[in-house]
Amino acid sequence: SPPDIGTFMHAVIERFSRLVSKGDITWRSFDREWCSQKVSEIVDEMLAKMQGSGLSASKRYVALASRLKRVVTRAVWLIAEHIRRSGFEPIDYEAGFGDNEKYPPITIELDSGAKINLTGRIDRIDALKTEDGMYLRIIDYKSGAKDFRLSDVYYGLQIQLITYLDAIWEHTGKSSDKEVHPGGMLYFKIDDPIIRGGSVLTEEEIEAAIMRQLKMKGLLLADVKLIKEMDRQIDGSSMIIPATVNKGDVLGKNTSGATLEQFKLLRTYVRRLLKGLCTEIMKGKVDIRPYKKKGATSCQYCSFSSVCQFDTGVKDNTYKLLYDRESEEVWELMNEPE
């Protein structure tokens, strides 16, 4: 099923990443043939451990294995392309934060005195070391479409990336002798899209079109020098990150960026949001109040619908209506005192 396939592809990328981090071959050195071969071997090995009797002989299994190999090979090769265009280097994969993990948990202290430890696992952490200090970047792999909206962070619908960044930012800042700064937080889509063109495209044009379609989404530190280190080939609009650099080294309006002060504000605001959520959980607040935004609702993929039986035809069963807000308004709202 789709969730299982997403988890499976994550696992294949993790195994490939660890293979590259341990051996003589690096992200910057392997060729496409070696990439395809290793992905194929990892997929075969993992499916062999999972399969039921007779499954491997079915046509469905053969088709599924072929598709998995194609999609993951595309994703892995694109990850390599991103790293080769960048000055950032991956420093950790599937990095856990929590008790008995490499990084400590995020501890939320409630007004009651109770403490709640938040734990999680980060797909990839990249770093860039400069004279000004070390810049950290969080990469989260997604098998489905995932956009980044600041207003969704404000509403508490999209706090995963900043929470991950916070966990690493705090720990690395304490343990490093260098100043540690947030470089960015990005979603990387795992996909092998179909490219449609009016004319016959060359292999090079197809590769460029795929790269643009799978451009990472998220929020970057609004620093031209740093943006140019994330994409050393940037010329106008980047093919790999949500940024544009115009003539005179000026960031374009299509750049999804935030200043260091705004990143700190985001971190403080989400911590406040998490504290509020944890307080509600501890009080046992479980009101059935799903959100609705542009036709999308939190009920869409919820597995508890049969339990809660939310129905707008029943009195008091109403959606919490949310509206998209412009980034400038969101920054102002986040800056307001509690």
Image: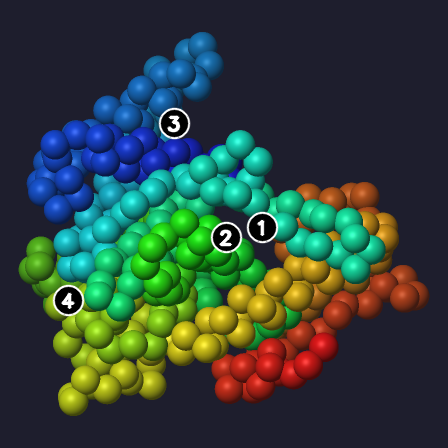
Work out whether residue 239 can be spotted. Answer: no
Whichever of callouts 3 and 4 sits on the residue coming sooner in the sequence is: 3
Along the line of sight, the residue nearer the viewer: 337 or 38:
337
Q: Amino acid at mark 2?
A: Ala
Q: Secondary structure at mark 4?
A: loop
Of callouts 4 and 1, the N-terminal one: 1
Front of the two marks 3 and 2: 2
- What is the residue that sits farthest to the bottom in this orientation? 248
Whether pointer 2 and pointer 1 mark residues with C-beta atoms closer than 8 Å, the reply is: yes
Which picture quadrant has residue 19? top left
Marks 3/2: CA distance?
42 Å
The residue that appears at 50% across and 35% down in the rendered structure is: 101
Gap between marks 3 and 4 measured at Cα? 42 Å
Compared to 134, does 152 lie above or below? below
Residue pointed to by mark 3 = 60
The residue sitting at 12% across, 32% down in the picture is 24
Q: Earlier in the sequence, mark 3 or mark 2?
A: 3
Residue 100 appears at what percent x and percent y? 53, 32
Q: What is the CA distance from the residue labelled 4 to the residue labelled 1? A: 34 Å
Question: Where residue 201 appears, x then y in whole percent?
Answer: 10, 62
Mark 1 sits on what residue? 106
Residues marked 3 and 1 touching at CB (< 8 Å): no
Q: Any mark on residue 167, and which?
A: 2
The mark closer to the camera, 3 or 1, is: 1
**Which amino acid lies under the numbered mark 4 shown in the image of this protein?**
Arg
Q: Residues within 10 Å of mark 2 (few under 14, many from 20)?
A: many
